[in-house]
Image (spheres, helix red, strand yellow):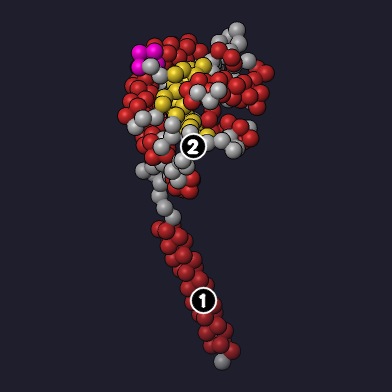
Amino acid sequence: MKAKNINKRAIFYVLIITLFFHGNLYAQSAASEQKENFADDWARLTKYQKENDSIGQPKRGEKRIVFLGSSIFEFWKQKDPEYFEGKAYVDRGISGQISPQLLVRFRQDVIDLKPKVVIILAGSNDISGNTGHVTNEKIMKNIQSMAELAKLHHIKVILCKYLPINEYPWAKHIRPADQIIALNNMIEAYARKKHHIVLDYWTPLVDDQKGQRKALTVDGVHPNLEGYKIMEQVTEKVLDKVLRRR
């Protein structure tokens, strides 16, 4: 009699454990199915989608300015948030992005926000991930497409000369200094031809090795706070000219 009770009890516990195990598997499976897959969002349009919706359209008299770029712009707001506070400045930098990703984002993160001005900083990530397929000519085509879209929508264009870099910590086999200089020359030539403004971030930051001055950078690629302060001075001078604020 006792043996039968023990067997019944054992069977009961086995059933409970089995149901619990399968219940967990079902819950995990359901959670997995509910989790949204963003593998198709190559340009990361979702990053600023909610923020774009929340800021809405510019108010009357507002001269909105969008900063479109990669980590240099994204980290800027993190390093010196006070620069962006109280201004109609919209930072739309995404770390690691290459110029075709900026082009894909251009409608959502620039045109739809209806800014007066867009500041475009592009090219370094294309170069740092160079597998032989990326050329300055291809980078320029993406920059040109963004500039043309902006002009079509009556947005003033500011094209940036890229910051000096002579080595990427994550890709030390690439020597980018001369390619960045050549790209900057192409950007200047295109800007002159199309009557766009050039914002020169290269000259005030460069050292005698065609890289960033050590006192102004955290890793030879990204500025530190002092480096960003210099960029702010240069940016404000150009914006004063473009918007005729003084």
Q: Nearer the viewer, mark 2 or mark 1?
A: 2
Q: Is residue 224 magenta?
A: no
The location of residue 3, given as percent across then percent down, is 56, 86
Count of numbered badges drawn on the protein: 2
- Disc number for residue 16: 1
Q: Specify whether residue 101 is in view.
A: no
The location of residue 86, given as percent across then percent down, is 59, 38
- The residue that label 2 is drawn on is 62
- Using the image, determine if residue 69 lies above or below residue 35: above
- Using the image, determine if residue 56 lies above or below residue 92: below
Q: Which secondary structure, mark 2?
A: loop
Residue toward you, 20 or 111: 111
Which of the 4 quarters of the picture holds residue 231?
top right
Magenta stretch in the rendered image: 190-194
In space, the residues marked 2 and 1 are separated at their CA atoms by: 65 Å
- Using the image, determine if residue 28 lies above or below residue 197: below
Residue toward you, 180 or 243: 243
Residue drawn at (44%, 31%), measured in percent from left and top? 116
Which of the 4 quarters of the picture holds residue 154?
top left
- Main SS, magenta residues: helix
Q: Quadrant of the N terminus?
A: bottom right
Q: In which quarter of the image is the C terminus?
A: top right
Label 2 environment density (alpha carbons within 10 Å; few <14, some 14–19, many ≥20):
few
The location of residue 31, given as percent across then percent down, is 45, 60
Residue toward you, 162 or 42: 162
